[in-house]
Image: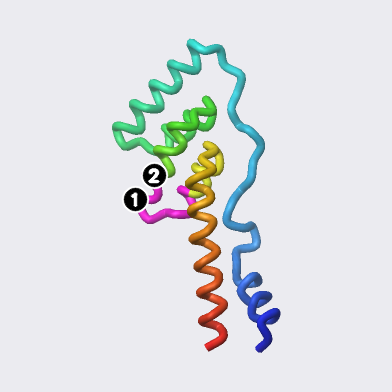
Amino acid sequence: MSKKEKVKKILNSLPGEGFLKVTVDRSVSLNSRDKVALIRKGNELFNRGKIDLAKRIFITAGYSDGLIRIGDHYLKQELPLEAFKMYWMAPDTKKVQVMTEKMGEIIRKWLRENDE
């Protein structure tokens, strides 16, 4: 099997919808007082372990630090694609770059395994 065929085989095995759902900025226009209140509520929920609710609030408020903390949580839970989504939305370019490089290494490893 040629390298081109192997790459095609690997790409065909990936989910059709892809790994990321790319969306437009989902934050809404809030005055600073409402935004602060939302972020406080999100932090409270995060600290109580209600990650999904905190995530929704952080996305709505456009709170980068909260999204990064959610991403770190997902990474600890061994959910790297979910973590990547949060870092992408934050945006935390450093963490996105590190994870993209790791994903590239994984794909290269898959290609080498198919050669054998």
Q: Which secondary structure lies at badge 2?
A: helix
Q: Is residue 2 above or below residue 100?
A: below
Residue 44 occupies quadrant: top left
Which secondary structure type mostly characterizes the magenta part of the structure?
helix
Q: Position of residue 65 (x, y in %)?
A: 44, 32
Q: Which residue is mark 1?
A: 76
Q: At numbered mark 1, what does the secondary structure look like: helix, strand or loop?
A: helix
Image x and y of residue 73, in percent: 37, 44
Q: Quadrant of residue 49?
A: top left
Residue 95, relative to residue 55: is it above or below?
A: below
Quadrant in which the N terminus is drawn: bottom right
Q: Is residue 98 above or below residue 107?
A: above
Real-space CA distance between mark 1 and mark 2, rounded to the nearest whole angstrom = 6 Å
Most extreme residue toward the left is: 48
Asked if residue 53 lies in the magenta stretch, the reply is no
Along the horizontal axis of the image, is 101 left or right of 18? left
Q: What type is the residue that disc 1 sits on?
A: Lys
Count of marks, rendered view? 2
Instruction: Check disc 2 and report the residue beneath it.
Output: 72
Residue at (54, 56) in percent of width and height: 100
Q: Residues within 10 Å of mark 2 (few under 14, many from 20)?
A: many
Residue 91's spot in the image, x, y percent?
A: 54, 38
Tell whether position 75 is magenta. yes
Could you tell me which residue is drawn at 40 percent across and 27 percent down? 42
Taking the spot 37% from the left edge, 56% from the top edge, the residue there is 78
Q: In the image shown, does 62 or 41 lie closer to the viewer? A: 62
- Residue contact at pointers 1 and 2, CB within 8 angstroms: yes
- Indicate how the structure is coloured in the image: rainbow
Q: Which residues are magenta?
A: 72-83
Image position, residue 56 (x, y; %): 49, 33
**Which one is in front, 64 or 38?**
64
